[in-house]
Image: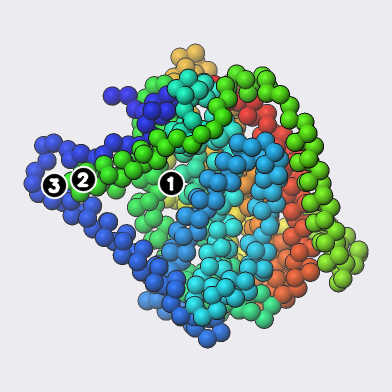
Amino acid sequence: MERETGMSALKNITFAAAQPLGGHTHRKRFVWEALAFSLLVLMLLFVAWGTEQLVHPLNIGGQEDISLEPKHLPFYALRTTVRMLVAVGFSLIFSLGYATIAAKSRRAGQVLVPLLDVLQSVPVLGYISFTVTAFIAMFPHSNLGPELAAIFAIFTSQAWNMTFSLYQGFMNVPRDMSEAAFVFHLSPWQKFWRMEVPFAMPGLVWNTMMSMSGGWFFVVASEAITVGNNKITLPGVGSYIALAIEQKDVNAIVYAIIAMTVVILLYDQLLFRPLVAWSDKFRYEMTASQMTPDSWVLSVFQKSRIMSRIWPLVEKLIELMMRFHIPGRRISPLKAIYNLRPPERYIDWAWYSLLLVGGIVGITYTFQYLQLDITLAEVGRVFSMALATFVRVIILMIIASLIWVPFGVYVGLRPRLAEKIQPLAQFLAAFPANLIFPVAVMVIASHNLNPNIWLSPLILFGAQWYILFNVIAGASAFPNDLKEAAHNFQIKGWAWWRKVMLPAIFPYFLTGAVTASGGAWNASIVAELATWGDTRLKAFGIGSYIAEMTEKGDFHRIILGIIIMSLFVVALNRVFWNRLYENAAKKFRLD
């Protein structure tokens, strides 16, 4: 039977309730039931334990003693995993709301998309600097305050690329699907859940994996927080790594790597591989693919009688939600294409005036705040530091694209290979640059190398994976009928890349490139200031400047660094990436 694709996604995006497979022996049935029941119980226990850990009373001083003994690592790994999963949940909710408004409202998009550029360019340390005190003040006698500060820091490393992925998916929905939704008289609410979300789902799943990995990259900064005189240490792999680096304990670093590997493999098998296999049903194509991803966890639940009885109730609730009719204006796709709506000139003028006034007020207050303690000469010096980081980011982005675009296409077109590469890619993307500091610092210091050059490659660890994951998502979503057409017309070599594959993955690559650019600027905070024990190496750049000012608790200079970094990121995105984005939306849609 042909898989659910294209138009059928309009009629049903929920998968059918799993039925036990015929022909199985009683023993095999018992094994499937036991596995499914055990997984459900473990998930419920994990949720209950994680909730209890978040709200227990706060220790004096807001710190907990961290031990480098390996026996404590499983507990630390579970605490870190709870924070990351909670942050991913909030990131998903935020992405659905933010991307929908930005894609649906022209006026809101004019503000939200540039604002998203700013949000992703603000370093994690920048958010931590201003949120730790606020969260602790909100929950003064509970551990929930520091935990929420850590979760929020992880959220800021996860949410932006998920939002960009959804926005890219919503903006590139094929016109024939929009026309079908209009013909079927779908309301905006029904169109959103039955067409737009399913179309964006494959890319969102891969970017969610990238978000989990991105959270690992900044887990040290989120669990071992130091802002001026405030120091908060929460039990977790990040604080364990921070203490190991401070004490120059190589064995502890190895133990942390092993713990990270085990955790990544577990949530890959239990969470992301089932999601990848499930989201494959939403590929936009007219013929079924010969190879589809699978998951043993998904198979367990499909063969379980427990789920065959529970899932119909869940499915009915989902179907009722999708059928819920919210009144809204339905616009013909042809009318939207040819701009037949009358121009709302006066509303636009009022909107732009409001934005102008808001911008002037914001700039005025910021200028008044900064001029109290900062000279024009220092602004010029920080600008030159940002320019140095900008050159590093551009060079490293070009290198990452040349390496990972061909590799991502090769993997994405082969689902079986993608299943094997997926956990490895997640591990490499999650690998914090802090764990490379021992080798990097010792090599640079012993050979008297220039930190401005040799610390730069560490930025790649926070940037290149956005490109890889999005290219894999784009190649995985490449319609099988187009693949067969290219084969039948014998399009090969460079012509295949230029006329078939590059146009198909270009919107996905742009999403990866935009988020990779923001990730590279964020990674510069970690990469340009490397420490190992008492040895401290610093590269000339805006990242090292913000890291130093955060350690000192100098909020004036933290804001100055964040503003100048944000200006560079927004200018790059507005002048270069967004123009490519608009061209991709017009020329490379799967219509």
Pointer 2 or 1: first along the chain: 2
In the figure, is residue 390 to the left or right of 336? right
> Does residue 503 sit above or below 93 in this rendering?
above
Q: Amino acid type of disc 1?
A: Gln
Identify the secondary structure beneath mark 2: helix
| Residue under label 3 | 29
Q: Return the residue nearer the eye: 582 or 456.
A: 582
**Residue at the farthest top position:** 489
Q: Amino acid under label 3?
A: Arg
Q: Quadrant of residue 505?
A: top right
Which residue lies under the disc numbered 1? 422
User: Which disc number belongs to residue 309?
Assistant: 2
Observer-side mark, 3 or 2, equals 2
Q: Residues within 10 Å of mark 1 (few under 14, many from 20)?
A: many
User: Where is 263 relative to 426, above or below?
Assistant: below
Where disc 1 sits, the SS reads helix
Residue 325 can be seen in this image = yes
